[in-house]
Image (cartoon, rainbow, N blue to C red):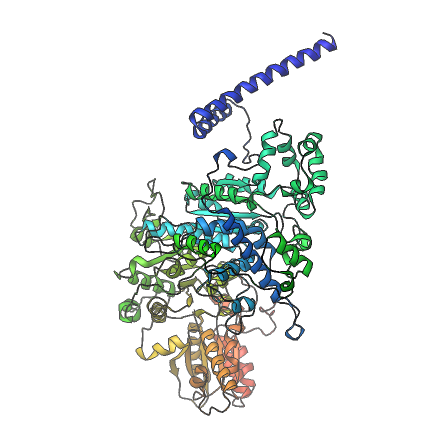
Amino acid sequence: MSSSDQVNAIANVNSDEALETQEWLDALEAVLDREGPQRAHYLLEQLIDLARRSGAHIPFSPNTAYVNTIPPGLEPAHPGNLILEERIRSYVRWNAMVMVVRANRHHPADGGDLGGHIASFASLATMIGCGQNHFWHGETENHGGDLVYFQGHSSPGMYGRAYLEGRLTEDQLNNFRQETGGKGLSSYPHPKLMPEFWQFPTVSMGLGPLMAIYQARFLKYLHARGIADTSKRKVWVFCGDGEMDEPESLGAIGLAAREKLDNLIFVVNCNLQRLDGPVRGNGKIIQELEGDFRGSGWNVIKLIWGGYWDPLFARDKEGILRRIMEESVDGEYQAYKAHDGKFVREQFFGKHPKLLEMVSRMSDEDVWRLNRGGHDPHKVYAAFASANEHRGQPTVILAKTIKGYGMGHVGQAKNPTHQQKKLDMDAVREFRDRFNIPIPDDKLEDLPYFKPADDSPEMKYLHERRNALGGYLPKRRTKADEHLKAPALEAFKAVLEPTAEGREISTTQAFVRVLNQILRDKELAPRVVPVLVDESRTFGMEGLFRQIGIYAPEGQKYTPVDKDQVMYYREAADGQLLQEGINEAGGFSSWLAAATSYSTNNRIMIPFYIYYSMFGFQRVGDLAWAAGDMQARGFLLGGTAGRTTLNGEGLQHEDGHSHIQSSLIPNCVSYDPSFAHEIAVIIRDGLRRMIENQENVFYYITVMNENYPQPGFNPDDEEGILRGMYKFKSAGKGKLRVQLMGSGTILREVLAAQELLESDWGVASDLWSVTSFTELRRDGLDCERHSLLNPQDTQAPLPYVTRQLESAPGPIVISTDYIKAYGDQIRPFIPKGRTLKVLGTDGFGRSDFRSKLREHFEINRHFVVLAALRGLVEDGQLPVAKVVEAIKKYGIDPNKANPHHA
């Protein structure tokens, strides 16, 4: 065959293939036209399945073309007044910008700038306006209200809108980021700082998306259990595309799909920039995120191009425009909007001569006007409506926007845009003109806010839309309307009495008994939310599986392998226990949703999250801080706490510092109880404070797995248990006397030391059970502050620990299972002139038996005795030879390596 014949043959083959391809495409179009996309999708899936079963390798691709998911022909008509909405949006933009720029006018006497962000809201304004005007419900009698997690850096825009609504004053806007006087506005969404405004703290990147997923799941949980009708409610979450790099942002999207959270809508603001530069300069963040979410089972809506592109797409018969869009990377897309129409013509359309021809009749201004989807109100409404109506899956809207949209020459799409907080007058004038703000030139220097007259069409429309949707957002409830009562302490009789002869239990077992007692309370039981992360059997809580069931939206579709056992693994659609798997961040997020339910759902819940204490504050400390900000109310139980209690586990499991971390959160009330009756007293008081009085505190309680006899409750000790310390036992009558203090299981070592001091050295002692060094310190700091500010007060209160110890003579020895800093917190409040020795477990943990670990960390009974004797020496009551004698007597090696060093 000649070469020309070969060419003709190939051409014929290619022609045949092209014809066959077109026939398949025509057939697909016919199905789409006559039977709809669902039928077409079914047929395609069947074809792929057949090909794979026949041995063909057809790789999965979670990506679709780089165009809008909703084509123009399927977009619903926008129901609002677009002209009025645009004006309102422009006024909000202006007020947000003015507020930030005013806050950053140079104030050298006050230490310079306050900071602030304009660019993020500038990219979000159209979408937030659409949600406010058409989708987000306020709380009404028939609707619990939608929950919106606003992107943290967009807060200026929310303040700008609230000012128009009459919810914030000009004086408040003038005090943006100036909060200490009590009338300022917080830099970001902070419920603690603005308790009737912000619902969720979202500026700690990644926490908003994570918390929102578990919040949406908790709404389903409440509905399934019949506690609240949440069927109409949605959770909307605004995230930045750069924020999606945080592991927490994507960490739970699988759960959202698995549990079919169709009440959840993510809106990822893809302005292509993070703080320092492009998110994916060499790639496409929208395509990447589409793969992540679609692959995880989400409904994905891409909102990339605005309506000005539609005529060009219609003329793109050869697909060249789409191909160039596909090939261009985000670094280029950022540059297109950082320059002008001429640049876009040359750099984008200039990639192919037919594209240049396509825009040849368009001016540079027309080219520059080609908009992105997130700034087109028609496209935004279509995407939001589709997401709002979708069922069976969570939805993510990937919206392409411009960072610093409308900020002109100083900021739009430039790398420093995120930090932009000052505008020169040319930029202010450009901003005014861009958004048609009716401020004359002679007033620009004053940077006035703009608010139309109350009877203007814009203001009437603004209020009409929110009234139609049930009220204004964001808005936060500070207290639930309902009233629950804490049980009497006597209800926990089972753990208040001494254990029977020969019986021993741990404080973990005591907690489980307390929890079971609360579950017998008819009023409180339905509100209890146990949260576990795959350690139920570790904590002896597997009995709850059958008793209250594990929440599973689809029930239990299988017969558990342990069905023949009393405590078998039972899942149920109305189950009460939340089993999060090996997932501390998820467990904490579920606890957070329940702990703030009084605010978000007007339902008081009682969450108990129990976990390995080492995997609590250390692993999810940022979420714990958010709990403080959100005014959470509930119980955190750090199980098998302490550095020597969890024998056999080693360095990564042994907790010696969680109480230091919990002490950093002002509204976290922390306890390290030693005995069952202390657990009961503390939890009962927590119920009183949090569910009965609705105080904004949450509790962290450490519990251990070491079994020992329980001494029972003395009613006279209740105040001391709650204040932080009480005298547990006095021993000996000798002239020499010391004060011994301990907490948790180490109190048992201190008890043994008390006996050794009396029997071996003739030293008497008072032993104090310290339930909370943290609470003692806080009380001491309060008293210290009072004295500082009231020097004339001769009756100033003394710290509680001072009052307890001032009449108890002798040196003081503290021993805990935590680093020395925990016990050392009360040093400033020890009575003057008293010797204090603090023992602790500084250093890395080890794996061994408890007795060996306590010897290793030098906190066991022998070291308590040694510290007490040393204290007596320093007080001049014993010769130093007694300490040397004790070292020999107890076989202590003074030359061993220091365990408290690395």
Q: Which residue lies furthest to the left in this view?
A: 522
Measured as percent of width and height from the top left, residue 403 is found at 61, 51
Measured as percent of width and height from the top left, residue 657 is found at 52, 67
555 or 790: which is nearer to us? 790
Can residue 204 be seen? no
Does 294 sit left or right of 345 as displayed? left
Q: In this view, does 505 lie above or below 251?
A: below
Does 323 sit left or right of 641 as displayed? right
622 or 865: which is nearer to us? 622
Q: Which residue is at 46% across, 55% downward?
A: 462
Q: Residue 18 is drawn in which quadrant?
A: top right
Can residue 633 be seen? yes
- The quadrant of the image that shows the C terminus is bottom right
Measured as percent of width and height from the top left, residue 684 is found at 33, 69
Q: In this view, does 175 lie above or below 411?
A: below
- The quadrant of the image that shows the N terminus is top right
764 or 331: which is nearer to us? 331
Q: Which residue lies furthest to the right in this view?
A: 3
Does 71 sit left or right of 318 as displayed? left
Does 4 sit left or right of 23 as displayed? right
Q: In this view, does 39 lie above or below 894?
A: above
Measured as percent of width and height from the top left, residue 756 is found at 44, 79
